[in-house]
């Protein structure tokens, strides 16, 4: 079968990959659409140096084989993390943090292929009427929803998102549903204009940056700051923007390290929350009810993966 394989250094297009065979408790899925995530790009930069296998984790597909007969023929989206099922994390609802978890596209074969397998309990049927081209946004939208599951957002306060990319766009729409006063800070004027329906203010990072960071008053700072930059500069700026006793939500994952004076966190009593994967069911519901909307994905053939990864589109991916 066709697949996009990471060999430890680069992506390799293959036409001779073996079609996977589902083990007990797993389903075989014919992938219909798969999106490229920034994490996939970071893998190519060394984010998961030990990984060798088929890339990709954002997908929609049709179940073609399963021990759960009711799933066969269903259109599904799927979660990333399969835990062992027996450890403390798995027993307490924290499967995505299982120390021996299998993560599609990062530690085991993912969805940039014609077929994939996934544990049955990680599959979520796509609601009738929700087109697969839109349902493929389920996983990243779920990651945005994780913020409001982790942090009690007071809509009477204010929030800032640092970053003007795809994940930031989804986070903005999720936070806008709370009614909070929202500011988006980014580097690209053409991207910032996309946020106007959801944000009260869109600012260039130039407003804050310079040879020295511009000193801010408490009124100019924010109770909640979300770092969705995808790079090492985001956390330092987030700390500069957050109010004392405020909260920083870190969504960025990248291959690299950042340098921040950690003593400032206890001194200023700032809460730092790491945030990763989120709930699929509410994401599917929001997509079905069209309470969130995203620009169309620019789909490519798998063989054209270099063009897909280089695409400047809001989101690029593969159609099978």
Image (cartoon, rainbow, N blue to C red):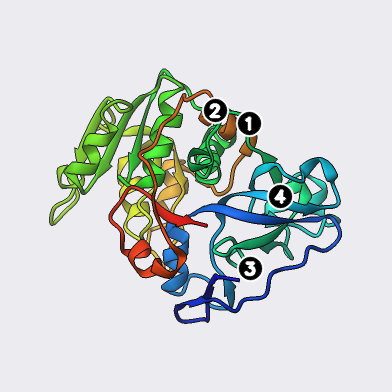
Q: Residue 29: name its quadrant.
A: bottom right
Mark 3 surroundings within 10 Å by alpha-carbon count, few (fewer than 14), some (14 through 19), many (20 or more): many
139 displayed left or right of 115: left
Q: Viewer-nearest of labels 4 and 2?
A: 4
Image quadrant for the N terminus?
A: bottom right
Task: Provide the residue designation for mark 2.
Answer: 288
Question: What label sits on residue 253 in the rendered view?
Answer: none
* x and y, in percent, of residue 224 in the image: 41, 34
For the residues labelled 2 and 1, the Cα–Cα distance comes to 7 Å
Query: Considering the numbered disc 3 on the image, is that residue within a helix, a strand or a loop?
Result: loop
The mark that comes first in sequence, 2 or 1, is 1
Circles 2 and 1: CB distance less than 8 Å?
Answer: yes
Task: Provide the residue designation for mark 1.
Answer: 127
Q: Viewer-nearest of labels 3 and 1?
A: 1
Task: Provide the residue designation for mark 4.
Answer: 63
Q: Residue 193: name its quadrant.
A: top left
* Foreground pick, 61 / 95: 61
Whether residue 215 is visible to the viewer of this picture, yes or no, is no
For the residues labelled 3 and 4, the Cα–Cα distance comes to 17 Å
The mark that comes first in sequence, 4 or 1, is 4
Circles 3 and 4: CB distance less than 8 Å?
Answer: no
Task: Provide the residue designation for mark 3.
Answer: 109
Q: Is residue 29 above or below residue 14?
A: above
* Foreground pick, 107 / 71: 71
For the residues labelled 3 and 2, the Cα–Cα distance comes to 29 Å
């Amino acid at each position: 079968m066709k697949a996009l394989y990471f060999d430890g250094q680069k992506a390799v297009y293959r036409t001779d990959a073996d079609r996977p065979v589902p083990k007990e408790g797993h389903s075989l899925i014919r992938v219909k659409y798969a999106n490229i995530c920034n994490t996939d790009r970071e893998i190519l930069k060394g984010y998961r140096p030990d990984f060798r296998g088929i890339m990709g984790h954002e997908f929609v597909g049709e179940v073609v084989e399963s021990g759960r007969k009711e799933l066969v023929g269903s259109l599904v989206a799927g979660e990333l993390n399969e835990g062992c099922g027996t450890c403390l994390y798995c027993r307490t609802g924290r499967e995505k943090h299982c120390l021996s978890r299998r993560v599609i596209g990062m530690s085991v074969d993912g969805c940039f292929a014609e077929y994939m397998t996934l544990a049955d309990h990680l599959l979520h049927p796509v609601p009738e009427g929700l087109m697969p081209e839109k349902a493929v946004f389920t996983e990243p939208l779920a990651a945005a929803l994780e913020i409001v599951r982790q942090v009690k957002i007071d809509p009477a306060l204010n929030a800032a998102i640092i970053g003007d990319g795809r994940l930031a766009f989804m986070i903005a729409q999720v936070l806008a549903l709370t009614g909070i006063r929202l500011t988006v800070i980014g580097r690209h004027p053409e991207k910032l204009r996309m946020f106007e329906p959801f944000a009260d203010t869109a600012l260039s990072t130039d407003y804050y940056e310079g040879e020295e960071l511009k000193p801010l008053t408490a009124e100019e700072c924010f109770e909640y700051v979300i770092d969705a930059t995808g790079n090492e500069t985001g956390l330092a700026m987030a700390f500069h923007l957050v109010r004392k006793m405020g909260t920083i939500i870190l969504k960025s994952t990248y291959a690299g390290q950042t340098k921040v004076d950690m003593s400032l966190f206890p001194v200023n009593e700032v809460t730092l929350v790491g945030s990763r994967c989120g709930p699929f069911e509410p994401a599917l519901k929001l997509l079905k009810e069209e309470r969130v909307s995203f620009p169309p994905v620019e789909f490519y053939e798998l063989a054209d993966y270099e063009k897909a990864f280089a695409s400047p589109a809001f989101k690029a991916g593969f159609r099978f």
